[in-house]
Image (cartoon, grey):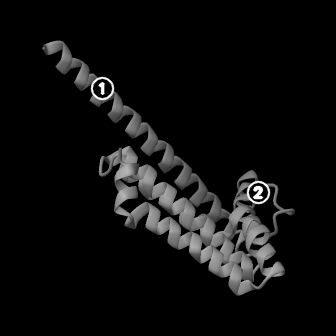
Amino acid sequence: MKRARASMNDTQERDRVWSDAFGLALFAIGSVSCALLFKTLTHTAGPEESANWAVQMGFELLWATGPVPVSLMSLACLLLGALQFLGYQDAQRATRHLAGTLGVTLGLSIVLGAYSPDAGGRLGVIVGGGIAELAAAPLAALIGLGMVCGSVWAAWMGSAQTTAWER
C-alpha cells in the first residue's frame, strides 16, 4: 500500500517539475520576444542598417505577423508562463489559453493585413491582402474576425471544448 502512495507522489512531483519547466519556457519565450519587440520598435534605423542581431531578430518577428499580433502573443506567453510557474493553473489550461491566443493572433493578423501591408505582417499580406485583392477588404476582415471569434469560442466559451482540452 505504501508503494502505491509513493509512486503517486512521485508522479505528482514529476508532473509539477514538467509544469514548472513548461512555465519557465513560456516565460522565457515571452520575455525574449517582448524585449526584442521593444528594442526593435525603439530603434531609429531600418533593418538593413542595423548590425545588432537583436534588432534584426525583432524585425523578423514584426515581419511575420505585424506589431500588434506579435505583442499580443508575446505578452500572453509571458503571463501564461509566469502563472504556470507560480502554480496558478495547470498545463492543460495553459495549453488551451495559448491555443486560443494563437488563434486570436492569427485572425488579428489577417484582419490587419486586409487593410495595411505593414500592420498584419507577412501572414496578413498573404492571407488578408490576397483575399482583399480577389474580393474586397471587408470580406477579408470578416474572415479574420470569424477566425478570432471561432478561436475565442473554442478556447474559452464552449463548455464541451473546455472539458475536452482539460482531459
Disc 1 crowd rating (10 Å Cα; few below 14, some 14-19, many 20+) is: few
Q: Is residue 117 visible?
A: no
Type of the residue with mark 1 = Thr
Q: Is residue 113 visible?
A: yes
Q: Secondary structure at mark 1?
A: helix
Which of the 4 image quadrants contains residue 160? bottom left
Percent from the top left, x then y, of residue 64? 72, 61
Percent from the top left, x then y, of residue 35? 59, 58
Residue 29: image tag: none
What residue is shown at x 32% (from left), y 50% (from top)?
A: 89
What residue is shown at x 51% (from left), y 56% (from top)?
A: 99
Locate residue 61 relative to residue 154 in the image: left or right: right
Most distant residue in the front direction: 160
Percent from the top left, x then y, of residue 13? 29, 29
Q: Report which residue position mark 2 lands on.
A: 56
Which of the 4 image quadrants contains residue 61? bottom right
Cβ–Cβ under 8 Å for marks 1 and 2: no
Up/down of 92 relative to 76, above or below: above
Q: How many marks?
A: 2
Q: Report which residue position mark 1 lands on.
A: 11
What residue is shown at x 57% (from left), y 60% (from top)?
A: 34
Q: Secondary structure at mark 2?
A: helix
Disc 2 crowd rating (10 Å Cα; few below 14, some 14-19, many 20+) is: some
User: In which quadrant of the rendered image does the C terminus lie?
Assistant: top left
